[in-house]
Amino acid sequence: MNVLLRYTVAFAAGVLLHAVLTINATVMIGVVATLAVVLAGLLLLPQSPRYLLGVVTLLLFVGLGWLRTPSPDIPADLEQVTAYKAVVSSLPETRAKTYKIEVEIQQVKTQNQWQSRQGKVLIYLDKNAPKPHYGEVLLIRGAPRRVEPPLNPAQFDYQRFLALKQLHFQHYLKATDFVLVAQNQGLWHKKWAYWASDWADAALRRLVPWEREYAVAKAMTLGLRDEMDADLVAAYSAAGAVHVLSVSGFHITVFMWLITWALSRLEKRKYGRWLYLGLTLTILWFYAVLTGLSAPVIRSALMFSLYLLAKPLGKQSSIAHALFGSALLLLATDPLLLYSVSFQLSYAALSGIIFLQPTLYQSLSFKDWFVDKIWAITTVALTAQLATFPVAVYYFHQFPTYFLLANPFVVALGIAMLPVAFVAIALSWIPYLSEALGWVLTGITWLLNETVLLVERLPFSVLEGLSFTWLETLVVYAIIGCLLALGYYKLRPWLWAAAALSAGLLVWQWTEIQQYRSQQIMVVHAVPRHTVVSLIKGQRAVLVADSAFFEPDRKPYNFYLKNFYTQRGIAHVTQEALELPSEKLGVVKPTAWGKIIVWQGRKLLLVEQKIAAFPSLKADVVLVRNTAYKKADDLRRTFGQQPLVFDGTTKWYATDTLQKAAQQARLPWRFVHREGAVVMQR
């Protein structure tokens, strides 16, 4: 095993152990110091045991990974402040209705006095307000709110996602909620990077007049997807081409090819090697700055830098050393990157391409140049997809069926587009020539988009509803590893190991399917401003909700329910709107005071207005919606001690009052917006 890979795996193990192993930091420092002394002693011995030396070194890296991982630091009283002063610490991201920015707190106001405080807040700023810039200091009225945990089963854990970025609070601001009080208080290198990114973005905006094509050109050259609509991103995902939308190894490879072609003659001159290296690294990192020093670009630029530096420093150039060396350096800088989906997918794809693609490519040979290049692109797509599909299924629960069909065209058009984009941005100040390059760039990007959309329209372009647990994901990677070892070592035990793991995975999946077929669940979901009820029997579900929930873009469904349905193996969903219930389905029935849902012998009463007395019906659940009641006394007179559920359609001012009253009187009332979804199983 590659030595840098061993150290990287050991360091990553230390990062993971930090989440499950609670040890006093002083004790761990002592352990690491002891391991360092032992390692130094072993290195001084004339003939130190090689095995012991390796074990101590790996344990040392595990300890360093544990020590380097930051402990969660959550300010406890930010919700009590009345105002705070903060500096913009990120490049503003344009959303449909808001600007999304990160700010770092400098001071907070509590009880009419200011005091220094540290912390980060995620700001969603109304687009009617002026767009802030990096380094500006804002005086903000009000208090940020703690990011809430997921309230529905299997819902995307946005709280954990932000916590891994040390973000625990968020704040929605209108134009009147803040004022600009100072400028230029950010780090100089970030300020310059974001300025360069804004300049390149403005150049692209002028060069590419069509909105859709501009959004894709911006994503591919600058790594910023904020101008792309969700449908277009979904189309690239369905075609297995979403990787081209974030600047990564593919883009840097094309960029490096351009640099190599332009500077290749320098290497033949005296001192040309060093001049070539200096110019190459300068241009490479200038491009990284141009993208705003985004994490994927830094990963790729660092890897290529390590690769380029090896030869002039008298070391053998090894793309594997560069890959694992860059991963180790990045994790040492920010250990929480290990939990980043982008980081995991990026290094998985590069590992597959580096270690598997050459062998697969050499398995077939073609005399025709064009066919050979198509085969080369196909092998890159195959190996990258093989290395990433377990992680992709774990996070996204889908697989692009026609990725082999789409990738040759996407890669070819990407290779054609990126040089034109780089040259167009560089020459954007030259009249007429820049306009001509802009139209060429627009045409290539249009063709790329149409190719992706064509693939997405094909039947069964995406296999959805796939699900792996984290343990199943590890088993799939173990099977792939055993098969690769079988191909390399040609030893039968690897075949038996792969077969045993595969059989175990099949039994596991079969057991889950049997559980899905016998399940019977009723769920009142926690969805803001909506009533949403799932009625699940076997692998079929009836989704009952107000009609506003069934938006064409399916955003609410995808965020709150999709993962849950995938996790429970739901194969068919029938939608039922509360306002227009289907007589054929017969699940929702109107009443004088609301509605009643009758399903599999259960009754769910939906109370939408005040009623004089509790209906003479035996109900499993009484759901109060649309702020039908605002006073606890009215509810107690009508329903007594009957368990009640209040969904997301009840206004916050009413639920706060009702929840306090319920706690004081110890009433069996559930408020889904605070306590989470109500799940009832048989």
Image: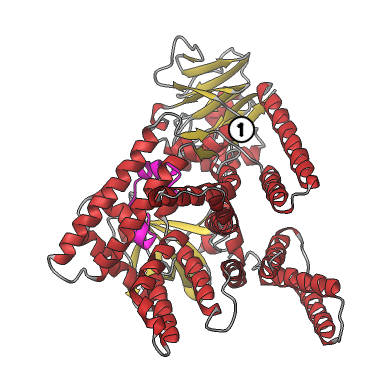
Q: Is residue 231 magenta?
A: yes
Please, which colouring scheme is shown? secondary structure
Q: Amino acid at mark 1?
A: Val
Image x and y of residue 207, in percent: 21, 60
Q: Which one is in front, 463 or 369?
A: 369
Determine the secondary structure under disc 1. Answer: strand
Image x and y of residue 632, in percent: 55, 34
User: Can you identify the residue that label 1 sits on?
Assistant: 678
Magenta segment: 218-242
Q: Quadrant of the N terminus?
A: bottom right
Q: Which one is in front, 409 or 52?
A: 409
Tell me what residue is drawn at x 53 percent, y 52 percent: 361
Residue 618 in view of the camera = yes
Q: Quadrant of the C terminus?
A: top right
Image x and y of residue 560, in percent: 51, 38
Crowd around label 1: few <14 · some 14–19 · many ≥20 (10 Å): many
Horizontally, is 179 left or right of 115 in the view? left
Residue furthest left in the image: 432
Tell me what residue is drawn at x 32 percent, y 56 percent: 416
**Dominant secondary-structure state across the stretch colored magenta:** helix
Residue 238 in view of the camera = no
Quarter of the rendering containing residue 27: bottom right
Tell me what residue is drawn at x 46 percent, y 29 percent: 628
Horizontally, is 149 left or right of 369 in the view? right
Q: Which one is in front, 303 or 307?
A: 307
Please tell me whether residue 486 is drawn above or below residue 262 in the rendered image.
Answer: above
Image x and y of residue 642, in percent: 63, 25
Residue furthest top in the image: 584
